[in-house]
Amino acid sequence: MSVTDLPTPALLVDADALDHNIDVMAAARPGAALRPHVKAFKSSALARHVAARGGHRSFCCATLREVEGLLDADLGDDLLLANETLDGDRLAGLVARDDGRITVAVDSPETVAVAAAAGAEVLVDVDVGLPRCGCLPSEAGEIADRARAAGRRVRGVMGYEGHVVGNPDRAARTAEVARSMALLREAHDAVGGGLTSAGATGTYDLHDWVDEVQAGSYLLMDSHYDQLGLPFRQALTVLTTVVSTSPSKGWAVADAGLKAFGMDHGNPSIDDHEVFFCSDEHTTFLAADDGSLPAVGTRLRMVPAHVDPTVAYHEVLHVVRGGELLDTWPVDLRGW
């Protein structure tokens, strides 16, 4: 089947770029040194491909749905829910399945109590600079003590330096990672446990201390991460169709907009054209420097600025090589 036969908008994954990204990351962080974060791609089929080609069998999850889906796909060797949850009944149900290892992030007495009642192992989540979840380093020891007193295994600590992972200044990223990891070391000294977990695609090669890095966007990439000069290729594009064009007005319109792209990092991009604005179902873009516009019916591949929410808007990933469709992978880990 040809890519031109697909209805638009459609997510395309370049098979060769994807495999390049898997190979580059596996060389830098082999095996358990990487915990691929499935929130970036939300597909158990893609996770299975990463496990087979990259040799990574531990996965990081953002939602209980992701945990559930990876268990169903027989990819539950070592799953980390890297978010706090108060949905104790659902967590307990997943732990009780006994077909995988489930660890959950905790940062408070309340989340410890939920994890303990569910029977899950825990990782103490530490605030290392991103104003989100995580206890203070000075509180980490007490959180760990509570979990152990409740009969839970404390595997160690995690901290996400999300405030710096997208900074295009490598020197600034390096300095901020060092500051964040100093906080995580402080917490680790108080908590004990063998596992230290941190990082993301933007800082994957700046960690020389933690056991594992939680990176996911490297697999598909986006324009936001592309500005960092990382060795990963743009594997994901959104196939669109030009549905209106007006040389007299100087713009054309493609059939993918706010409901097809994650927009928190900015507009999607189109080769040789500047995006004017996006509305619900459309992207309006300007003529090229030479004044040219594509004709109605032209297929365009657009690059999202933020891959994670972009994928979550779609139901399938179309794996392609050149103009041919190789496979279709369901985005089966959507939802919560």
Image (cartoon, grey):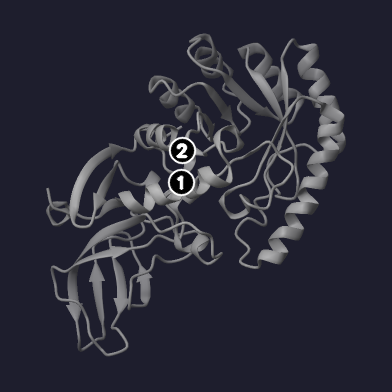
Residue appearing at x 28%, y 83% in the figure: 287
Residue 265 visible in rendering: no
Looking at the image, is 310 positioned above or below residue 59?
A: below
In the drawing, does residue 170 fall left or right of residue 77? Answer: right
* Marker count (numbered): 2
**Kind of residue sitting beneath label 1:** Asp
**Kind of residue sitting beneath label 2:** Gly
Q: Are marks 1 and 2 in contact (CB under 8 Å)?
A: yes
Looking at the image, is 70 positioned above or below residue 259?
A: above
Q: Position of residue 199 (x, y in %)?
A: 64, 46
Residue 318 visible in rendering: yes
For label 1, count other residues whose C-alpha is less than 10 Å away and answer few (under 14), some (14-19) or many (20+).
some
Residue appearing at x 26%, y 46% in the figure: 318
Considering depth in this image, is 12 or 7 the residue closer to the camera?
12
Residue appearing at x 82%, y 46% in the figure: 182
Residue position marked by numbered label 1 in the rendering: 23
Residue appearing at x 48%, y 33% in the figure: 55
In the drawing, does residue 314 fall left or right of residue 140? Answer: left
Q: Position of residue 333 (x, y in %)?
A: 40, 33
Considering depth in this image, is 273 or 206 the residue closer to the camera?
206
Looking at the image, which residue sits at the far front?
Answer: 27
Considering depth in this image, is 315 or 220 the residue closer to the camera?
220
Task: Please give the label number shown on residue 208.
Answer: none
Residue position marked by numbered label 2 in the rendering: 54
Secondary structure at badge 2 equals: helix
Q: Position of residue 315 (x, y in %)?
A: 30, 41
For label 2, count other residues whose C-alpha is less than 10 Å away and answer few (under 14), some (14-19) or many (20+).
many
Q: CA distance from mark 1 to mark 2?
A: 6 Å
Mark 1 vs 2, N-terminal side: 1
In the drawing, does residue 302 fall left or right of residue 322? Answer: right
- Residue 148, image quadrant: top right
